[in-house]
Amino acid sequence: MKQQVVRFSPHQNGKVFAVLMAISSLVFLLPMILIFMVSAPTRARPPLFMLVMMPVIYLVLGYVMVAIGCLIYNFMFKYIGGIEFDSTVAGA
């Protein structure tokens, strides 16, 4: 059966995506911190504050961008329709 997504919740989707972005940024950030601390001379190391702030920046920007995207989708749904997908009942 075909179904359409009528509305995306900007706040809920923003929260989920923001947390995912912050956590996934740590996957890249932690090895980079270790590499910089071991290989770079003392004066060339990036400030530790900046490295700690990157997940926070990802969290905030991820939330804002997804919330704006959901608001745009919700507005445009009236004019162009929504995302369509097919679904079935399991075991049917």
Image: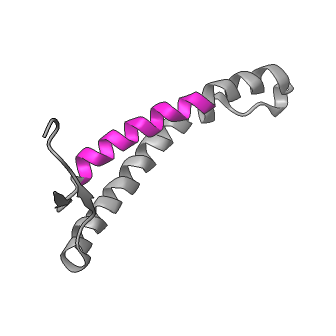
Examine the residues drawn in magenta and state their main secondary structure: helix
For residue 50, which quarter of the picture?
top right
Left/right of residue 66 with respect to residue 39 in the rendered view: left
What residue is rendered at 42% in x and 48% in y? 62
Location of the C terminus (image quadrant): top left
Q: Position of residue 26 (x, y in %)?
A: 55, 29
Location of the N terminus (image quadrant): bottom left
Whether residue 23 is in magenta: the answer is yes
Magenta residues, as a range?
Answer: 10-28
User: Foreground residue, 50 or 21?
Assistant: 21
Whether residue 92 is in magenta: the answer is no
- The furthest residue to the right: 41
Relative height, residue 86 to residue 26 (above, below):
below
Relative height, residue 50 to residue 87 (above, below):
above
What residue is rendered at 57% in x and 28% in y? 27
Q: Position of residue 66 (x, y in %)?
A: 36, 54
Q: Position of residue 29 (x, y in %)?
A: 62, 31
Left/right of residue 51 with respect to residue 3 in the rendered view: right
User: Foreground residue, 1 or 35?
Assistant: 1
Instruction: Please say which color scheme the image uses.
Output: one colour
User: Foreground residue, 63 or 9?
Assistant: 9
What residue is rendered at 37% in x and 48% in y? 63
For residue 79, which quarter of the picture?
bottom left
For residue 59, which quarter of the picture?
top left
Q: Position of residue 32 (x, y in %)?
A: 69, 29
What residue is rendered at 17% in x and 62% in y? 6
